[in-house]
Amino acid sequence: MLFYVLIDKNGAIRISPVPDMDKLLKKVLRPGLPLSYLQYYLRNILCSDSSCIKKASHKIEKTIINQVVKGLKKDETILETQFDWYDEEFNPQRQLAEERFLRILPMIEGKKITEGEIAVLAKTMSISNNDLLVTINEAVSRGLGEWLPAISRNQSGWVCERCSSTQIQEWPSLYGKAATCQECEILGSQTSLQMIFRSNQTENNIMKPLFHNDQDALKERWSIEFTNAQAKVAKRLLEYSDELKADEVLLWAACGAGKTEVSFPLIARYLARGKKVLFAAPRQDVVHDVYPRLQSNFPNVPIKLLSGAVPQKFGESILTVATTHQVLKFYRHFDLIIFDEVDAYPYSESISLKYGLKAALRESGQIVYLTATPSDELLKKAVDGRCLIIRLPIRHHGHPLPLPKWIEIPLKINYPINAETNLPIVISNGIERIIKEVIVKGPLLVFVPLVALVPQWITVIKKLFPLKSVEGSWSSDPKRREKIDSLKKKKYDIFITTSILERGITISGVQVIVLFADHEIYDVRSLVQMSGRTGRTNETPSGTVLFLANRETKAMQSAKTWIEEQNHFARQEENENA
Amino acid sequence: MLSSILHKLKEGVNLLWYEQQEKCLLCDNLVQETICQSCRLEYFRPELNRCYACGKLIGQNKIRCSDCKEGKGPKYLTIATSLGHYSGAWKDFIQKVKFKGQPYLLASINYYINGWVIKNLPPPDAIVPVPMHHSRLAQRGFNQADVLASILSRQLGIIYRDVLHRNRDTIPQTSLGRQERLNNVLGAFYLKKDVDLKGQIIWLVDDVVTTGTTLDECAQVLKCHGVRDVYAICLAAGIEEIQ
Ligand SMILES: [Zn+2]
Ligand SMILES: [Zn+2]
Ligand SMILES: [Zn+2]
């Protein structure tokens, strides 16, 4: 989108994508340029805040042209650099309708809206792109938001205004150097030739309260009945987040402790006050699993689901469920963010997503992290007192977590390259015996460290157990969703998978085998998570976890210690509660 | 001229590319080549002929598609050819280049384009891109046909000449019906001032060919100004149902 420098009747300089909508319009510099170029070339003339305006002096018109032309030439533009000031008049036909303005305002509040999204939003609102642009520009001139280049430029390089990444691919455009952000491409690509509208934090974020009786958040009927331990933790969450206004709270729960539900009373209290809540998780599977649970627990609340797997919808909403990437679309919007599985990839690895989470939260807002396996970074925060910590070591049925057992078996990662011949008889016999013992207890989940191993081991195990139903899935498997549904319905006896199923899934009676448990890809957290798939339901509160490997790694030992500690802590808690 | 800037770009992209060259550009297969063999077979369809009049992919025993046989196709092109079928991951790739601000991706596939055009077309005197209207160029910041022409020019050492001008912004061809498409581009192009191409052989470059109307319109302008032969090169074209 092209922006224009204009000088108004008071001699003030501004930048606008729709200069003919400016009632004070006097002169416009044409042709227009993408915002990133204007901001960069005129950085000493314009203030960083676009609403801040410098008075134009006599020579300024010439100075502006000179700086723009000089900048473009330095960037090796192929544009003909002929710029001129034109006396122009306000165009009354494009008069802004106040009614339309008020209708659109809630759609853009608390958001970052990209050039690509303008068209989507315009369609949703049944108005033209241009009318929407005019409306958003009005919001900017009323100080409700800002126009930013999608990728900003400064002396040291490029910065993506959506995800804060500085890892940007540069390329030569008509204007000269241009750039595309590859970090947040998943949300639609962004280049330095485009702009983004970013809403400012609104003074009054309150929506219409949903319940009247907010004292009863704890007494609500939730889809699961809280154990004493859960009720205690839910109460503490209310105290820490809502009453003490702690910036960050970590809820460290055992796998299968029911940590998600524990956050519902807190969510209810925020909703009751008309405050906006986001439930976020790094993985689509987790988000799609939580969404229906929120729906059944908050039947009167319209819930918005945002993930790469569903088409994007605009519109305000008090409760949003989203993958962490979607968080990059918001700015100073939420009063409470519940962040499930905070240590999962890709969030755990991404600086951009960490930035995005903080940017989506209002300055006075609270974040609650939920996890069974907090990262060292988060634990350190808790130790330093920068994040309050609450522990929920007791599983909801009260039984301890099954302890993993290491079985030494000379497995090599290149087994089997060719399923027909390569697996040594000692190994296939060993594995057959182990699986036979385990499988009588329930369906079996077999984890392998690499995607390529999934189809290979399906073949191997099918050969060993021709009468059993054997399937498998991995992250890019097109049938992943339906296979996982079938798995939950217990349609398979043996299911081979990668780390995609290491968290968030509950299959009654499931047993776990981790093949190549000594593989470097498995850290203590993923081993604990995989072990935590077992014994999750009331009917089958225990289970078997086997680590099959050549050697016992430090991660395997730590996983065992970690689970033992959690169980020990759970017993202590129970004694205290008794 | 865009090609001079592209020179720098291409080196940068190549460096980046060799470092990352483990995944197929189109399907994420782990391979040692830019585009894996199964994608090449699926999208480039080397076993099929191209309609010499419009570049469309056609059966092995044909030389023209049925539209062109009925005289509905381009009339001013000597030969048209297209690298692949506008579908699936190849279509996604071209859309990424055009609409998602990633023109640098074109530099990574130059090997396939070069090979294809050298095999199918005689050497020209100059390479000419199908121009984009200036208002659209201003918005997008680049013309993908221009980028492609510049890459070919530099790789094959052929002169690049940006000699055509687009009068008005036509509606994207892919969104229109056949008759609308034919009317859409009439009179849209003219030759820039003081350009002499008499007796020359020209390669005309565009990203996607639909009916060939745009290419034909450009070719007509070129031929009116004494160009001897116009050959058209595109990244992708439609396919004629093969019985
Ligand atoms: Zn980004
Ligand atoms: Zn491929
Ligand atoms: Zn044809």
Image (cartoon, coloured by chain):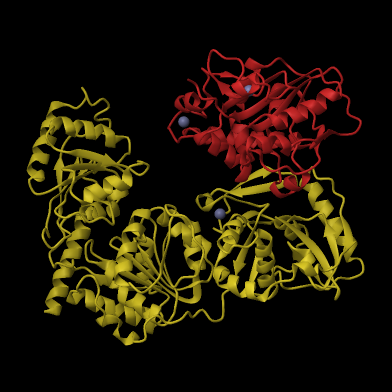
Chain colours: A yellow, B red
Q: x and y percent of residue A442 in the render?
A: 11, 49
Vertical comparison of A219 with B81: above or below: below
**Is A175 above or below relative to A93?**
above
| Image quadrant in which the N terminus of chain B is located | top right
**Quadrant of residue B195 within the rendered picture:** top right
Q: Position of residue A412 (x, y in %)?
A: 24, 33
Would residue A340 be seen by someone viewing this image from the given angle? yes
In-image side of B138 versus A540 (left or right): right
State the residue lying farthest toward the top: B61
Q: Relative to the observer, which residue lies in front, A488 or B158?
A: A488
**Who's the residue at 56% across and 77% down the image?**
A202
Q: Is residue B150 visible?
A: no
- Quick check: B65 left or right of A68? left
Q: Quadrant of residue A52?
A: bottom right
Count the marks. 0
Say which residue appears at 30% left-offset and 81% top-offset.
A217
In this rendering, would B145 be left or right of A223? right
Residue ID at (29%, 60%): A373
Name the one closer to the observer, A529 or B19. A529
Residue A137 coordinates in the image, percent (x, y): 69, 68
- Residue A368 image offset from top left, x and y in percent: 37, 71
State left or right for residue B139 relative to residue A429: right
- Where B178 falls versus B153 (above or below)? below
- Ligand 1 shows up in which quadrant of the image? bottom right
Quadrant housing residue B99: top right
Query: From what the image shows, is residue A292 above or below residue B128?
Result: below
